[in-house]
Image (spheres, rainbow, N blue to C red):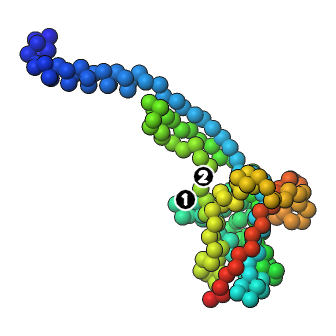
């Protein structure tokens, strides 16, 4: 205690404040949240038209994670390395999300400092024609659009022939359909 007696009043106050701050941080509550979620069942149908309103065949779909790497199968079930969705003669490109799950852990320290993420993982949909990106859209916006608007979307049971999941007998599920028309300029 000789050390303490030899300190000036200002140093004693500083050490006391530091000790109190440390004690508050060491004993303050931490909120931990373990969560899980999923993308909804949905079908995206995008129709690509050129400047004259004619359908554009051959637009290819590409899905990337937040680091820019292609993401096959999850969350888009019919996007595989050897099966890439492509627009047909009517300019319609269709892909499916079959309720891909996700989850994580997030913490809040001192009711202020957040770590981890309690959000769905972010994916980007890129659409390529002749090897160049002609349109880009957030997968998450497509997936959760009907929930954010809660109007103007169609829910229907798709015919099994419309679902290509790479299995012999895909299950019929209820999908909602997000439709878009994308006007592009041909190169």
Quadrant position of residue 22? top left
Compared to 78, does 21 lie above or below?
above
Residue 7 is left or right of residue 155, and the answer is left
Q: Residue at x 58, y 60 (%)?
A: 65
Comparing 122 with 167, the one in front is: 122
Location of the N terminus (image quadrant): top left
> Mark 1 and mark 2 in contact (Cβ < 8 Å)?
yes
The furthest residue to the top: 1
Location of the C terminus (image quadrant): bottom right
Evaluate whether residue 79 shows in this view.
yes
Quadrant position of residue 81? bottom right
Compared to 67, does 100 lie above or below?
above
Residue 68 screen position, x and y as percent: 54, 64
- Using the image, tell me which numbered label, if any, was put on residue 107: none
Few, some or many residues within 10 Å of mark 1 (<14, 14–19, 20+): few
Q: Residue at x 84, y 63 (%)?
A: 163
Evaluate whether residue 170 shows in this view.
no
Q: Residue at x 60, y 52 (%)?
A: 121
Question: Residue at label 2?
Answer: 121
Question: Residue at label 1?
Answer: 66
Residue 155 is left or right of residue 187, and the answer is right
Residue 28 screen position, x and y as percent: 43, 24
């Amino acid at each position: 205690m000789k050390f303490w007696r030899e300190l000036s009043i200002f140093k004693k106050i500083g050490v006391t404040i530091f000790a109190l701050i440390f004690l508050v941080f060491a004993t303050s509550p931490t909120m931990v949240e373990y969560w899980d979620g999923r993308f909804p069942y949905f079908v995206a149908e995008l129709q690509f038209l050129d400047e004259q309103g004619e359908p554009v065949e051959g637009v290819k779909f590409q899905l990337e994670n937040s680091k820019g790497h292609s993401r096959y199968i999850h969350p888009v079930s019919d996007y595989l390395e050897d099966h890439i969705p492509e627009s047909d003669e009517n300019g319609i490109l269709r892909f499916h999300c079959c309720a891909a799950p996700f989850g994580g852990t997030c913490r809040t320290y001192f009711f202020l400092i957040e770590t981890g993420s309690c959000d769905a993982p972010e994916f980007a949909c890129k659409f390529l024609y002749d090897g160049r990106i002609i349109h880009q859209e957030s997968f998450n916006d497509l997936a959760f659009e009907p929930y954010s608007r809660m109007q103007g979307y169609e829910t229907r049971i798709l015919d099994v022939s419309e679902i290509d999941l790479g299995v012999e007998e895909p299950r019929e599920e209820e999908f909602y359909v997000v439709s878009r028309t994308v006007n592009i300029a041909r190169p």
